[in-house]
Amino acid sequence: MKLIHTENYEAMSKEAADLLLDKLRKKPDAVICLATGSSPARMYELVCEAVNRERIDLSEITFVKLDEWYGVEPQAACTCTTFIREHLLDQLYMQPKAVVEFVSDAADIRQELDRMDVFLSEHPIDVMILGLGMNGHLGLNEPSDFLTLNAHYAELDEKTKTHDMVKGYEPKGGLTIGLQGIFTSGQIIMLVCGDRKEAAYQAFMSQRIATSTPASLLWLHPTALRWWMIPYRNNFLYCYCDKVMITKWRGVD
């Protein structure tokens, strides 16, 4: 596992954008899973700028959305659908082959979840973009006595209900890719920024695996089995492995 402490949000976003762009250039049929929120927003902007400038071919690329608020109109300003459209799809010179997503007002939740699981079983994710929730969640895999492997409906934690994306809205719950979909990803990039993430970050960095901090399970990712740590300034650590990168900056939420 490789942890990178960056000086600011721009530097963090560039580090992550470079990794994603490398995959887009080298694997023209890559499956990319996208998180939403302020943490990856600038990264997506930088990716779009580079894709448009270099005319990177996206015709065989598939985007998958990590999660979605449930019980709101798909075109509502708060949805992950709207976020990805505004921050990524509308900014690209060409569209990807497909965008696979949860429908925020799906009439049949079970069918919606099964549809995502079937897709993931047939199309493993090449790059998984994650943010760290204020409560330590991954996607909408919320803190609980137990966690779920497959795509599932999530009862929202009280902290999650205060997320900036849903201010002024009252989603009934959430739909999310489960831990199996996350852990079978070829590469994981988790971005952590903002003072409101500090408690979750410290819980993660304790390396204590607990379902109360779902992100802590990333320490069990297969590529994190062989790692070492080097002391770094300000008590930050660099940890190295092949496929998981986490970058943190104390800035915007």
Image: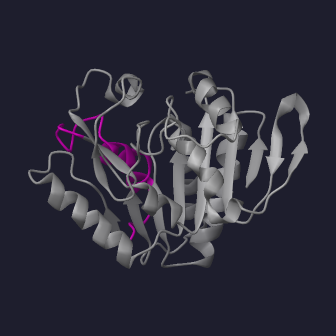
What x and y, as percent, mark residue 208? 65, 40
Q: Looking at the picture, does residue 196 appear above or below residue 151?
A: above
Q: Which x, y percent locates residue 170?
A: 22, 26
> In the shown orientation, is residue 143 left or right of residue 100?
right
Work out which residue is located at the far left of the displayed protein and give it: 107
> Is residue 130 found inside the magenta-colored segment of the image?
no
Q: Is residue 195 above or below residue 203?
A: above
The image quadrant where one finds the N terminus is: bottom right
Q: Quadrant of residue 11?
A: top right
Q: Is residue 166 visible?
A: yes
Q: Quadrant of the C terminus?
A: top right
Q: Is residue 97 visible?
A: no
Query: How many numbered discs, if any?
Result: 0
As drawn, is 30 to the left or to the right of 252?
left
Figure colour scheme: one colour
Q: Position of residue 196 (x, y in %)?
A: 56, 22
Residue plotted at (62% across, 22% down): 195
In the depicted view, which residue is nearer to us: 211 or 160? 211
- The foreground one among 18 and 200 is 200
Q: Is residue 122 left or right of residue 71?
A: right
- Where's residue 95, x and y in %? 38, 66
Which residue sits at x=57%, y=56%?
Answer: 47
| Magenta-colored span | 70-96
Pick out the residue farthest to the front.
Answer: 145
Residue at 52%, 35% in the rendered image: 136
Q: Residue at x 16, y 61 (%)?
A: 111
- Answer with left or right where residue 141 lies relative to residue 173: right
